[in-house]
Amino acid sequence: MSDYSIRIYRQSLIFGLIKVVKELFPDEQLKISHSILDGVYCELENSVLSSREIQKIEDHLKNWVLADETILYETEAGTGNNYLYHCQIGNEKITMIYPPLERSGSLKHFKLIHFNPGFIILFPNVNHPETISPFIPPEKLSATFSETQRWLENLHLCNVQDVNSIISSRSSQDLIYLAEALHEKKISSIADRIFEQRNNVRVILISGPTSSGKTTFAQRLSTQLRVNGLRPVALSLDNYFLPREETPLDCNGQYDFECLEALDLPLLATHLNALIGGSEVETPLFDFVCGGRCPAGKSMRLSSDEILVVEGIHALNPSLLPSLDRSQLFKIYVSALFQLNIDTYTRVPTTEVRLIRRLVRDNQFRGIEPARTLGQWESVRRGENNNIFPYQEEANVMFNSSLLYELNALRPFAERLLNSITPECPHYEMAVHLLTLLSFFDQLDISTVPFNSILREFLGGCAYNL
């Protein structure tokens, strides 16, 4: 199944879930909160659900699937090249950003898990659409979502319209500064935590999925480390790629640059052990044009007051550096966990926020057309599911790189790119969907976005040499 098909499947199950909860708890309000692993966290607005009640919801949802009911909906054309979908449940009209399936009978694969005070509805895994992956409670990821949710509540922000209202009242500068201040405070606290462990920690490992802002985060963290008297030294895992002809192939016979084995692991381990021991090494420099290493590398030695900052998608994989003493490592997971929803039932998928970031960045700085970025997305997502997400709980700390105002700021850039995709393109449906999503966000003047903001990694004008 394509990523778009998976989204339609999930949207249809969410519709069924809303319907069932309304029947079982007519005086309650279901809140579709945020994605977590292969599912979505949900809760009732005024009640804590018991395991027995959650099982009852699941049983009724299964009965709805077995009944193979028709899912009726109306399509509404937006002001541009976008559409909304409306379903009626009792006296309430439900607005959706994906069209549901025509019948409920094909929605056979799902599971509800008690996750206090609500539950998680688990969907099929993208790579294995007919199976539900084993559920391991993501305690650190859940805590990061909860932290962001508390911050939004403190600011009295519930949904996208609240942000739009601030923009329309010409107070967007305050909104930007608030969001950026939260980032700076969190980065500073991470640097303080590393400083407290400075006698042991020699290597900082930074990982996260594509378009999370890892590069800018690493630069800002390095600045805060220097404020604390530490001397960070950057080492990129990208320079340890194997020569292209030695790169493993994926199931389609294409070079698999996303797998761990695409890196020269023995050389990386040798260099890190040597650096931690105070020896000098010549680290490689990889030429992505020719697909091999440059003739000359870069000499490096780590002094006693320096700390190595290693960034890459495999940084949290325990198999990356199995021989290193774990007490010498400080691991950070960075992801854009966007948490403002459109309304009670309609969430903004975090992966689509990253896709919009990537569309804009790829076109502005890499000359990549939007159709190509959309075409690569399923492969990128497959790589994330295999190589990044399974290890996110390995992190000592998580950093949420999302910004309240980012889709407002990115909208004009992304809309121009998405509107260039024609109906003949195989990714047209996804382009229309992303346009629909962006239509909920009022445009924002980006002139006051700080030049060290993570968003500048995508918008341009970044103060750092990325």
Image (cartoon, helix red, strand yellow):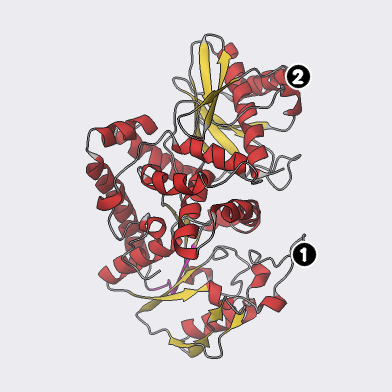
Q: Which residues are magenta?
A: 199-206
Residue 118 rendering spot, x and y as whole percentages: 52, 28
Quarter of the image where one finds residue 373: bottom right
Q: Amino acid at mark 2?
A: Asp
Residue 228 rendering spot, x and y as whole percentages: 27, 69
Q: Residues within 10 Å of mark 1 (few under 14, many from 20)?
A: few
Quarter of the image where one finds residue 134: top right
The N terminus sits in image quarter:
top right
Of the numbered discs 1 and 2, the one sitting upstream in the chain is 2
- Mark 1 → mark 2, Cα distance in angstroms: 40 Å
Residue 124 rendering spot, x and y as whole percentages: 69, 39
Residue bearing mark 1: 253
Q: Is residue 212 magenta?
A: no
Report the disc number at residue 399: none
- Compared to residue 65, the image places residue 135 above or below, namely below
Q: Nearer the viewer, mark 1 or mark 2?
A: 1
Q: Is residue 317 left or right of residue 344?
A: right
Where disc 2 sits, the SS reads: loop
Is residue 440 or residue 207 the one in the foreground?
440
Where disc 1 sits, the SS reads: loop
Q: Amino acid at mark 1?
A: Gly
For the point 63% across and 45% down, the residue is 427
Counting the numbered discs, the total is 2
The C terminus sits in image quarter:
bottom left
Residue bearing mark 2: 68
Q: Is residue 200 magenta?
A: yes
